[in-house]
Image (spheres, rainbow, N blue to C red):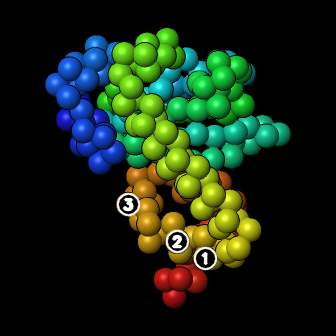
Amino acid sequence: MFDNLYRYTEQIIKLTPGEKALLESAFTVRQVPRRFKLAEEGKIARELFFINKGLVRLYYTKDGAEITGYIFREHLFAASYDSFLRQAPSIQTLETLEDCDLLVINHSAMEKLYEEMPSMHILTRKVAEQRFINAQMILSSFILDSPEERYRKFEEQHGDLLLRVPHHIIASFLGMTPVSMSRIRKRMQG
């Protein structure tokens, strides 16, 4: 269960056997079904997840509509980060889109890891930097790209998700209605 996590971390830091033992004692293994809420709007996010298998969606609720902010895939960390870091109520919901195999760490275990394993600071900084870069790319795309360009980029970078994620969720992530996305897809195929 930890092989994918180690492959991920080894791109950033080299872990000693002792550090691997610390990680394994800090994380728990959890399997959850599709449509399971890992964090909920209005509640404090107490856990951070590493996805071994499955997809997780982060979304906001506005006027009764769910607006997708991000889709986390295998071998990524997922959380309502703002809530997790500040231990304050979340403004977003984290929900599984498929049955998921997860590695889970709670906030207090993470704090303990920071004390026992200094390289954890480097790892979490790199994860946060990647989250920042992803957020900047999404924001830039909303400012600079047309809906067609956003769809084309999504298809190029995450085409496999078109087969795994309901299209209304992808449309929401791309800032368009399902009908608009359907029209764009038809134009691109034609």
Mark 3–mark 2 distance (CA, rounded to whole Å): 13 Å
Residue 4 shows in this picture: no
**Are circles 2 and 1 on residues that touch, CB within 8 Å?**
yes
Identity of the residue drawn at 28% across and 17% down: 22
Residue type at mark 3: give it: Asp
Which label sits on residue 64? none
| Among the two numbered marks 3 and 2 on one chain, the one whose residue lies closer to the N terminus | 2
Foreground label between 3 and 1:
1
Q: Quadrant of residue 126?
A: top left
Which percent across, then down, holds residue 74? Answer: 35, 44
Vertical relation: 103 (above or below) 163: above
Vertical relation: 76 (above or below) 27: below
Between residue 4 and residue 31, name the one nearer to us.
Answer: 4
Residue type at mark 1: give it: Glu
Identity of the residue drawn at 53% across and 75% down: 152
Residue 91 shows in this picture: yes
Q: In the picture, which quadrant includes the N terminus?
A: top left
| Among the two numbered marks 3 and 1 on one chain, the one whose residue lies closer to the N terminus | 1
Between residue 50 and residue 17, name the one nearer to us.
Answer: 17
Between residue 176 and residue 156, name the one nearer to us.
Answer: 156
Mark 3–mark 1 distance (CA, rounded to whole Å): 18 Å
Residue type at mark 2: give it: Lys
Seen as rendered, the residue at the extreme left is 17
Which label sits on residue 149? 1
The residue at which mark 3 appears reads as 160
Vertical relation: 31 (above or below) 60: above
The residue at which mark 2 appears reads as 153
Mark 2–mark 1 distance (CA, rounded to whole Å): 6 Å
Which percent across, then down, holds residue 121? Answer: 45, 31
Foreground label between 3 and 2:
2
